[in-house]
Every structure is written in C-alpha cells, then in structure tokens.
Amino acid sequence: MLIGVIADDFTGASDIAVTLSKGEKGEGGLATTQYLGIPQHPADPEVEAGVIALKSRSIPAQDAVEQSLAACEWLLEQGCEQIIFKYCSTFDSTDEGNIGPVTDALAQRLQVQQVVMCPSFPAMGRTLYQGHLFVNDKLLNESGMELHPLTPMKDACLLRVLQRQSRNAVINIAWQKVCEGEIALRQSIDAAGSSERCLLLVDAICDEDLITIGRASRGVRLLTGGSGIALGLGHNFIQEGRAKGKKTTLPLVNGPEAILVGSCSGATRGQIEEHQKEHPVLMVDVKDVLTGIVGADQLVEFIFRHQGKSPLVYSSGTPESVKNIQQAFGRENVSAALDNLFGETAKKLVANGIRRIIVGGGETSGAVVSALNLHALTIGDEIDIGVPAMVSKGEDPLALALKSGNFGGKDFFSRAVKALQGQ
C-alpha cells in the first residue's frame, strides 16, 4: 500500500477514494479499497491506496485523535508512504476541534515539520484564496454553513480557524506561488518548515492548482484536506512505475433497491423533491421517531411495498426545523435516534433481500454501514462528482452509494439506482 487515508466520515472517505481510484485523465488511478473502520487484518496485496472511514467529525477532539492515530498505525503497518487526513471541503469543525488536534497529533506521530493542507474542491465550488474558503461566490460563513447543526462555520479565514485549534504555526502559501509551478511550490513547502513545525494552508482555485500541489508533494509524509488534495498524488507513483494505473471493474450485483436519506442540506432537499415527482417517497417525522411512534418496521414495509420503483425514505428537514427539534430533545438524542433508525432499517432490508442501497448524508451513511458490519468496499466508477459506486467484499456482496449532503445533481437518486444496477 502506497497511500493511506484517514477520513473523518464515511461519505468523505468515498469521495477521496474515487479521486484516488480514477486518477488523472488518460493515466488511470490507484487500486483503492475503502475500509469501514480500522481493519483487524492486513490489506490485500493488490491494494495501492487504502481509505479508512471513521465517524470522527463530530465526536470529542480527544476521541477523534485516538481513533485517527490508531488508523494511522494500521496504515503504516501496510507500508504506506504518504498519509492523508481527509475532512470536508467546507472545513467542518468547531473551535474545539477536530481538524487542528488530529493534524497536530498525526504530525507528531510521523515526526514531520511540514503539513500540506488544502480543503479546496473546485468541482463543487469550494476554493481557497489568501487563506479564505469560498463556497461558489460566497465566503464560507455566508454560504449556509454558518447554520450547520453540528459544525457551524462562522469564519471563512481558515488561518484564524486553524490557529484557534492547533498548537503549531499556521502559514498560508498564496495562489500566486502555486501558479509558479511545482518546483517553486516545493521550495516554499521545504523552506516553511525549516525552523519549526508548520501547517501550510495552500491556496487552490482550480483542479490544475490541486494537481500542482499533489506533484509538489511527492514524498511529503502528511497532507490534509478535501478529496482534491489527492488529485495529483497517484500520478507520482504511476510515473515512478510503482503503481499500475489501471481501472477497477466491479462485480455485477443483482437485487432490489432502497434509498435512505438523513441529510438536511439544501442540495439533498432539492434532490428529494425531484425524486418524488416520479418515485414513491416517505417522510419520517423526527418527533415520531423520538417518541417511538415510527420505527424501522414501518420504513421497511414502505420500501418493500414499492419495490422496483426506487423507493426513498427520508428524515430530512430545513436547518431551522432540525435546530428546533435538537433544542427540544437534545442534539445527541436526536442524532442517536436517527442513526439507530436508519441502521436498524438497513439491517432488516438486507436480511430480507435488498442488495443495492443508496444513502444520503454523512452521519446516516456512517450509521448504515456500521449497522451492516461491512468491513471493506471496492471502489468503482463515479456516479456523480465525489460519489462512487462501491461493492462490499465477500461471498454475498452489496452495491452501495454514499452521498454527502451537498453532493450530486437534482436527479442523483434515480441515476444512482441505475448505476448500481450496472455494477
């Protein structure tokens, strides 16, 4: 294994896994496997990039640090030469963590002086300029992320955000330096950590910038960022003849389908509205879940009653309605109840023959794959930007797609069902 990734949620893991798997156009990527939690056994010899999906984004910082270090140890045991800490391209994190503390801990474990950091994902409108994060044409704190129920982002200056979280110096490498090319950028990276450990926030406003960052990071031990940070990294190993650069073909998975959605993002709400024009959709009232009126059996019955029509069940709501429910019942209680609902639903569905599952929302994706006790997923073609088709390993595989809340076009759910059918 050449590259090891520690991802702080399950959809983010899929996002960077498909980036590594597809590689640069005309060249191919790395043979990539996504692991659901820290594996208990060695990786298969053919795996060139391993992505460990944790559910650590919104847990206490010390717990996130401990889990990330444990994941790092396993990846190092597999021979990984580069470690990537993957978080959301909107830098989802409070002042208490978790991005800064995890980055500091990994840098100390790997004994590195420079950490290259870039959350940019231009294909989804997330760009970093002069250390400020933009979502499309708005600063991060004016993009709607300031209303996020778990990690409200109220400062677009990541230099300030990260410095409040980290014990190390935080420096911005400006876009103008990136434009000078990989040699000049590498010189800046090397110079920055000559006297003290530095976290280097590198600007990027297009994919070409990210490829420059990746190529300039040849041999850099630790990088952190969104999935775009991996765009140019596979090329380095393929060019050296140490990776094959060929496409992965997934096995065919036949069987009925289900769509489970727990995200409250604007993009997901729009996708649900589009889907229900031609497909059966069931909305679950969170209060009914919390009071025991609705449980997994009702969701399973709805899905099987509408089998073959791409049935979708969701608990999504506006940020305001989610906030009101959290205030009434407690944020942890609401999160735990929904995780349990979708996890139990997924187990019952699979036990009764469902073979293709599409999940919307990072927290919901984590709950579903954890409940199903899946250990590893092979990464296939990209269904939409940042969302791959995946197939679980084993004798009776499942086909899955795990979608982050803000990802995907309006017709994502129906396209995902068809894409998984073709895998």
Image (cartoon, rainbow, N blue to C red):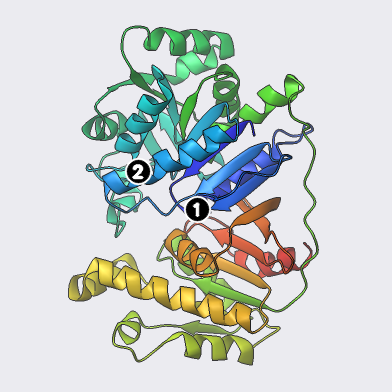
C-beta proximity under 8 Å, tags 1 and 2: no
Which quadrant is the C terminus positioned in? bottom right
Give me the residue at 30% from left, 52% from top: 151
State the separation of the CA atoms marked 1 and 2: 13 Å
Provide the secondary structure element on which disc 1 rests.
Answer: loop
Q: Choose top left, top right, bottom left or bottom right for residue 231.
A: top right
Is 50 on the left or on the right of 191, as rendered?
right
Q: Is residue 406 visible?
A: yes
At which x and y percent is residue 234? Answer: 66, 30
Residue tagged by mark 2? 66
- The outermost residue toward the left is 328
* Rendered image: mark on residue 37: 1
At which x and y percent is residue 10? Answer: 50, 55
Kindly identify the amino acid type of the residue bearing the numbered disc 2.
Glu
Give me the residue at 62% from left, 44% from top: 42
Q: From what the image shows, is residue 72 above or below residue 422?
A: above
Which quadrant is the N terminus positioned in? top right
